[in-house]
Image (tube, rainbow, N blue to C red):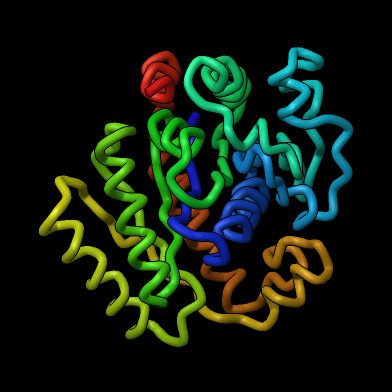
Amino acid sequence: MTLVSVLGGKGGVGKTNVACNLAVAAAARGARVLLVDGDLGLANVDVLLGLVPRGTLADVAAGRARAEEVLVRGPRGVDVLPAASGRSEMAALAGEALAPLLGAIVELARGYDVAFVDAAPGVGAAVVAFAAVSARRIVVATPEPTSLADAYALLKVMRRDAGAPDADLLVNAVRHEREARDTQGRLARLVARFLDLELRALGWLPRDARLVEAVALQRAVVEAFPASAVARRIGALADTLLEHAAPLRDAQGAAAEARA
């Protein structure tokens, strides 16, 4: 199986939309898909997809339930592992407290073809842990200077604390391809100059009013508006990820790295 973490240096770059829609698109192509809400204290995957969880990762962390017991079936048969909302103690999990939860998620993910983790924004302990255990790391950024600065900071922390040798850059909410290429080039030059990390250009997604409409409907845009420009590009990205599936990294090593 492949574990893919979807990351963002700051909030508001569209990370959750990317994770949810990639998961639904992959499931539509016949893959067995797990979608993990990795924003442990401020969950919104369930809200975006219009789901009602019967339990969350907070119950798993407290020992009240196993990970598979709180799964919710989402669009196209995606299994969603929801997180809690408004739980500061979950957002602050680190070290020895985080390791068992990470292990439970990794063990559950082994039963799927691909698992997507919608990580929290920023550079917290859980973000580093998910990046460390993932076979692929997708960093979502927009052309805004603040987004690029925070994406660079995230890549720096991933390289230093998660031992991540590479990452994929997905530029979101662009006006045209030239803007996407300019954005990719700026960040790639910084990474090449200052970080020993390979940053691959995964692609770009356009600004699309259909995505805003889908969010209001609490549906994935690839389901609600499959012919839209953004849905078509997400489908192509899902094809790429499924074609280049990579094995799951060792969970024990990643959990140890999370104890820093």
- Whether residue 20 is visible here, answered yes or no, is yes
Q: Is residue 106 above or below residue 151?
A: above
Task: Estimate the x, y position of residue 49 in percent, counting from the top left.
Answer: 78, 54
Task: Estimate the x, y position of residue 220 in percent, counting from the top left.
Answer: 72, 61
Residue name at image x 56 percent, y 33 percent: 113
Q: In this view, does 191 lie above or below 103?
A: below
Residue name at image x 67 percent, y 74 percent: 211
Residue name at image x 31 percent, y 75 percent: 183
- In this figure, what is the number of numbered marks? 0
* Quadrant of the rendering where the C terminus is positioned: top left
Residue name at image x 38 percent, y 43 percent: 244
Q: Which quadrant of the structure image shows residue 40?
A: top right
Task: Estimate the x, y position of residue 161 in percent, counting from the top left.
Answer: 31, 33
Task: Depth check: give the residue in front, 205 or 148.
Answer: 148
Position of 67 with respect to 11 (left or right) is: right
Position of 66 with respect to 35 (left or right) is: right
Position of 95 with respect to 42 (left or right) is: left
Task: Depth check: give the residue in front, 49 or 56.
Answer: 56
- Whether residue 36 is visible here, answered yes or no, is no
Q: In this view, does 119 lie above or below 220?
A: above
Task: Depth check: give the residue in front, 27 or 178.
Answer: 178
Task: Depth check: give the residue in front, 249 or 120.
Answer: 120
Q: Which quadrant of the structure image shows residue 107?
A: top right
Position of 50 with respect to 238 (left or right) is: right
Task: Estimate the x, y position of residue 232 in percent, counting from the top left.
Answer: 57, 70
